[in-house]
Amino acid sequence: MVVGGDAPHNIKWANTLAEQVNCQAIVVDLYDTRVTDDPETASTWMREIDQELADKKLLAALEWLEQPNRKLATYGCSFGGKESMQATLLAPEKISATAAAYCRMETDLEKLKTLHGPVLAIYAEQERTMPEKRENFEAAMKDAGKLTKAVSFDAAHGFTNPTKDFGTSKSPKSTRPSTTY
């Protein structure tokens, strides 16, 4: 499940996952078909999200994907990453794995204790809040006794968006060792 909006990069990620991993993929649109490339507009829309309605959309997507013997995973970037974790926390017994990139990470110990699968946390080193976010999340996951793998890239926020040019012809390289608990 790819969480965010129906922006081209989210659709591309869902299609890539479906093709390369041979899985069912769905994009959960939290923005009601609105799409923007403007960071200020996106920020405004994020603040306007009705979390109760967003939770209903996340649960409906999980229900749609759920099949006997099918493993479910969530993935999202930025606000979609936060909501990817939210989907996992809404139905932790259903989620086998969570991936969240350059987003606010959940650090509530009681919530994290409910997780049933590992979390891949992807960080953009050029974000000024990255070190603190990473340290706090890793400490919380360790205290909760949960498995996480962290990887960071020498890149700016948004670097996983394949529809954008971040001024490099190569993908950002991981510059920090991953940490697993």
Image: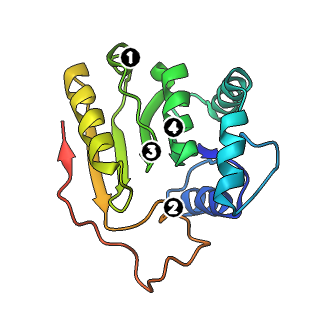
Marks 3, 2: nearer the viewer:
2
Q: Earlier in the sequence, mark 3 or mark 2?
A: 3
Q: Earlier in the sequence, mark 2 or mark 1?
A: 1
Q: Is residue 108 above or below residue 118?
A: above
Residue matched to label 1: 114
User: What SS does tag 4 mark?
Assistant: helix
What amino acid type should be assigned to the residue bearing mark 3?
Ala
Distance, label 2 to label 4, CA atoms, is 14 Å
Distance, label 3 to label 2, CA atoms, is 12 Å
Pointer 4 local density, CA inside 10 Å: few below 14, some 14–19, many at least 20: many
Marks 1, 4: nearer the viewer:
4
Residue matched to label 2: 158
Q: Position of residue 68 (x, y in %)?
A: 57, 28
Q: Position of residue 86 (x, y in %)?
A: 53, 29
In the picture as drawn, the residue positioned furthest to the right comes out as 33
Residue matched to label 3: 100
Q: Residue at x 35, y 44 (%)?
A: 120
Pointer 3 local density, CA inside 10 Å: few below 14, some 14–19, many at least 20: many
Contact flag, marks 2 and 1 (Cβ < 8 Å): no
Which residue is at the front of the view, 41 or 19?
Answer: 41
What amino acid type should be assigned to the residue bearing mark 1?
Thr
